[in-house]
Image (spheres, rainbow, N blue to C red):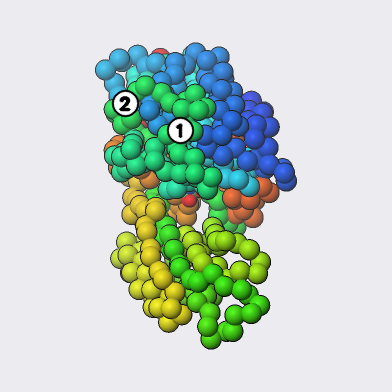
């Protein structure tokens, strides 16, 4: 019978080949990926993942949010499954590993169990969550959020992309709207392997991040209303300049984040001018402020300050201002016993490791609302992610997946 010993490891070459194969679907223009949620490329990636799971003898279930659940049976039909996964959708200029390592690492763990004839008491379910990135349809982690009861399905289906297409229509269009009731599945435990997406592990020379917490987040969508006017013939005192208000609000967000150091971030990744014409002052500017910190009180105080001061800045310029929270989760504490399983696995396997707080949000943050959950992290080169140049080493990928395998087997209980 296989035992949880240091020589129980995955097939790193097979894992790496799968990562490179998936990366060919929805390729970017600079070596990364553009496999945005509910696009034809997403559908193609889902089909490839399903074919691999079929070959591994797993059975598929899909819920009404398109979440994919691939089951490897356990010996006890009454035992709740161990869920393990992440997401296959990417940013428009995403990397090859964000999310994908967690899904294909989980598949590799199952493939290894199959190779060794390992049987577990609890079933194992590999998950691909729909729309983790929130790039095309805000908020991030949308489908795992519906699964955890944080959003209604109606809210999710009605979310639209910049072309006005709705989540619900696009899910149906690509043929991945399942029939399972979302959230009906119960989990014994949830594990997620993910690249760190930050510089700490590489800088500290550690192979494994033992993730104890995840910082909280607000996405505050500002809509500023100015007055469209000629950029040449409109005297400065007569301008109602929403673009100027936006720039002052961005400066203020930077100042608020810097005065809340350490462990606070703030910035803007998406902004839209309309009519977005070079010689027309914008009538409307829409942008999303992204603030994060592990400290609950600080998170809420930063939100309050940014909304108050943003309104003041707009008023000084005679610009209309409204703010909508389009994304949020409070700081997350992961399940201590699962965190210990990860730490013990790294020690058993001889991998260097350290505790870490996740800077990025993950589906595990919502899974933690409905089951004991935790994460395993591996380093990424220069801490770079959400960039096509995102890179990891095959060794880091294997180390993270070895630890994932051991932690999952610890919870799933090897029976023969
Ligand atoms: O925004 C995030 O932290 C994640 O990449 N969706
Ligand atoms: Mn991710
Ligand atoms: Mn991401």
- Give percent across and percent down for residue 101: 56, 36
Q: What element carries label 1?
A: helix
Q: What element carries label 2?
A: loop
Query: Can the viewer see residue 76?
Result: yes
Which-is-in-front pick, marks 2 and 1? 1
| Dot 2 or dot 1, earlier in sequence | 1
143 relative to 386 in the view: left or right = left
Label for residue 181? 2
Rendered image quadrant of residue 235: bottom right
Classify 10 Å Cα crowding around label 2: few (below 14), some (14-19), many (20 and above): few
Image label count? 2
Marks 2 and 1 sit apart, C-alpha to C-alpha, by 18 Å
Mark 1 within 8 Å of ligand 1, using the beta carbon: no
Rendered image quadrant of residue 163: top right
For the N terminus, the image quarter is: top left
83 relative to 35 in the view: left or right = left
Residue matched to label 1? 169
- Give percent across and percent down for residue 390: 64, 47
For the C terminus, the image quarter is: top left
- Above or below, comparing residue 175 to residue 318 in the picture: above
18 relative to 264 in the view: left or right = right
């Amino acid at each position: 019978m296989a035992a949880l010993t240091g020589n129980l490891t995955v097939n790193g070459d097979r894992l790496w080949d799968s990562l490179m194969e998936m990366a060919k679907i929805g390729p970017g223009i600079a070596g990364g990926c553009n496999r945005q949620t509910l696009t034809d490329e997403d559908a193609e990636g889902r089909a490839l993942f399903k074919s691999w799971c079929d070959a591994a003898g797993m059975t598929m279930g899909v819920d009404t949010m398109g979440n994919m659940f691939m089951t490897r049976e356990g010996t006890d039909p009454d035992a709740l499954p161990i869920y393990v996964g992440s997401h296959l959708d990417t940013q428009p200029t995403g990397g090859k590993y964000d999310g994908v390592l967690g899904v294909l690492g989980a598949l590799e763990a199952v493939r290894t169990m199959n190779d060794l004839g390992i049987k577990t008491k609890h079933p194992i379910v590999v998950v691909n969550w729909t729309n983790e990135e929130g790039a095309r349809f805000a908020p991030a982690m949308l489908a795992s959020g519906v699964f955890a009861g944080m959003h209604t399905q109606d809210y999710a289906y009605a979310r639209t992309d910049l072309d006005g297409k709705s989540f619900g229509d696009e899910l149906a269009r690509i043929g991945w709207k399942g029939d399972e009731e979302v959230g009906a599945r119960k989990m014994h435990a949830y594990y997620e392997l993910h690249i760190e997406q930050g510089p700490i592990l590489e800088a500290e020379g550690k192979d494994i991040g033992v993730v104890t917490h995840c910082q909280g987040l607000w996405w505050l969508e500002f809509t500023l209303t100015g007055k469209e006017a000629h950029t040449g013939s409109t005297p400065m005192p007569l301008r109602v300049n929403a673009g100027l208000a936006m720039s002052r609000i961005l400066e203020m967000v930077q100042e608020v984040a810097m005065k809340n150091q350490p462990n606070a971030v703030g910035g803007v990744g998406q902004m839209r001018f309309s009519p977005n014409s070079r010689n027309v002052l914008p009538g409307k500017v829409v942008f999303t402020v992204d603030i994060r910190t592990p400290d609950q009180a600080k998170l809420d105080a930063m939100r309050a300050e940014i909304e108050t001061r943003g309104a003041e800045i707009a008023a000084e310029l005679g610009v209309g201002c409204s703010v909508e929270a389009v994304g949020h989760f409070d700081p997350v504490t992961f399940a201590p016993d699962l965190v210990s399983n990860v730490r013990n696995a790294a020690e058993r396997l001889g991998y260097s490791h350290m505790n870490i707080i996740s800077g990025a949000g993950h589906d595990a943050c919502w899974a933690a609302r409905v089951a004991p959950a935790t994460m395993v992290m591996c380093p990424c080169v220069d801490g770079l992610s959400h960039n096509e140049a995102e890179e990891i080493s095959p060794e880091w990928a294997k180390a993270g997946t070895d630890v994932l395998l051991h932690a999952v087997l610890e919870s799933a209980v090897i029976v023969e």
